[in-house]
Image (cartoon, rainbow, N blue to C red):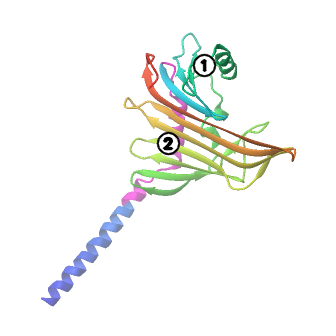
Amino acid sequence: MKNAQQHFRFRNLSSTILSFFFLSFSSSLCAVEPEDVLSALREFEQTSLDDWSYEFEKTKEKKTYRGIYLPVINGQGNIILKTIDGREPTEKEREEFNKNHSPRKPSDDKNNEESPSGMIASNSLILETSRDGFSTFVFTPLLTFNGPPKPVQAITGSLLYDESNKFVKHIHIISTKPFKPMRGVKIKNMQLKLEFDRLPDGTLVPLSNDMQVSATAFFVVNVTQGQTIHFKNYLKREVPSKIE
């Protein structure tokens, strides 16, 4: 009886080791590569939303703006401001908003430096963890300050990749220490978070954009700026009758 128990325990241990080895080996075969991530970002960047309308909610300087991006027609798409802090905006406020928000550009008229993949330094993507169908990568961010994009050592970046749906769920860039991007300007703290989603029909869309910066200019002026934008209710070839 004792030998049978020992044999049973030995078989259980052997099965556990073999299972662990098999799972580890399978995981290594299925590991997400940096090129998979870059391919997913390029798919997002090449996805046209010209035929889509979608709602936005923008928070900046303690004010909340809500409105709708209209589909692009004849090379131009309009932005309609619906409310400011829950009330209907005045005509002057609409004019001010429109002056500070350019008409939506067609998908084929984008600056590559402003794209998600344009913020990742070449060959810097490193797989950090992979579990439960999601992979986390770290990378060296590229930022543009009065010139071509360049890596900034005081900033670190990470992103989360959805393995089953094959898209990047979010990108997070944050400063680890103060840095000087240009003469007379010192960034004390900076963070940027971009979120994405894949719609039921497969279209990749932005969900949110959160940017927060605090800085000093010429050792005197303290500047704190930030804005958060959320996007939702994507409709193809139609416009919502009201904001949800």
Residue depicted at x 54% and y 22%: 67
Toward the top, the furthest residue is 74
Looking at the image, residue 115 lies above or below residue 132: above
Looking at the image, residue 148 lies above or below residue 241: below
Horizontal side of residue 238 vs 188, given as left or right = left
Q: CA distance from mark 2 to mark 1?
A: 36 Å
Horizontal side of residue 139 vs 188, given as left or right = left
Viewer-nearest residue: 241 or 196: 241
Look at the image and give the residue range highlighted in magenta: 26-51
Viewer-nearest residue: 38 or 175: 175
Residue depicted at x 56% and y 44%: 171
Residue 116 image position (x, y, % from top left) = 59, 38
Residue depicted at x 77% and y 45%: 215
Q: Residues within 10 Å of mark 2 (few under 14, many from 20)?
A: many
Amino acid at circle 2? Val
Viewer-nearest residue: 59 or 209: 59
Q: Which residue is mark 1?
A: 89
Residue 86 image position (x, y, % from top left) = 54, 26
Q: Residues within 10 Å of mark 1 (few under 14, many from 20)?
A: some
Q: Could one spot residue 188 in this view of the protein?
A: yes
Quick one: quadrant of the C terminus?
A: top left
Amino acid at circle 1? Pro
Mark whose residue sits in front, 2 or 1: 1
- Residue 49 lies within the magenta run: yes
Q: Which mark is residue 168?
A: 2
Looking at the image, residue 204 lies above or below residue 122: above
Could you tell me what secondary structure mostly forms the magenta stretch?
A: helix
